[in-house]
Image (tube, rainbow, N blue to C red):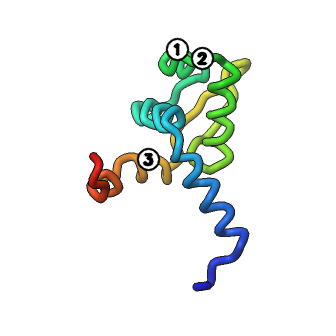
Amino acid sequence: MTGVSEGELAVMAQFFKALGDVTRLKILFLLLDGEKCQCDLISYIGLSQPAISRQLQILVNSGLLNLKRNGNKRIYSLTDNARIILLDKTPLKLSKRV
């Protein structure tokens, strides 16, 4: 292959898998407005706390979200890479179905 290691491919696959879910995309777009606590995301998305927690963990592990703790609250924000990806409409322009 062209100088891409198996480890790098695994990281890329995890990254793209994280973007391949409607609930996770909703979370990402909600965070474009700024950081939010997990409780806010639960009320916006309408899923249970465990379901949202799982989706948030996937996004953090894939490098799309930052997590900081403030007492009992978990505050999430977009990483710079996530912000760039969400603001770039190129993938939508390439799709014939949109």
Question: Quick one: label 3, few (<14), some, or many (20+) residues within 10 Å?
Answer: some
What type is the residue that disc 2 sits on?
Cys
Labelled pair 2, 3 in contact (Cβ < 8 Å): no
What type is the residue that disc 3 sits on?
Arg
What type is the residue that disc 1 sits on?
Ser
**For mark 1, what is the residue?**
43
Q: Where is residue 14 in the image (x, y as percent from the top left)?
A: 64, 54
**For mark 3, what is the residue?**
83
Residue displayed at 66% across by 61% down = 11
Could you tell me how far apart the alpha carbons at marks 1 and 2 are, in whole angstroms? Answer: 7 Å
User: Tag 1, which secondary structure?
Assistant: helix
Q: Which of marks 3 and 1 is nearer the N terminus?
A: 1
Side of 42 where 92 appears, left or right? left
Question: Quick one: label 1, few (<14), some, or many (20+) residues within 10 Å?
Answer: few
Q: Where is residue 18 in the image (x, y as percent from the top left)?
A: 58, 46
**For mark 2, what is the residue?**
39
Labelled pair 1, 2 in contact (Cβ < 8 Å): yes
Name, please, the residue furthest toward the bottom: 2
Residue displayed at 48% across by 38% down = 25
User: Tag 2, which secondary structure?
Assistant: helix
Labelled pair 3, 1 in contact (Cβ < 8 Å): no
Q: Where is residue 2 in the image (x, y as percent from the top left)?
A: 58, 85
Could you tell me how far apart the alpha carbons at marks 3 and 1 are, in whole angstroms? Answer: 22 Å
Side of 57 where 91 appears, left or right? left
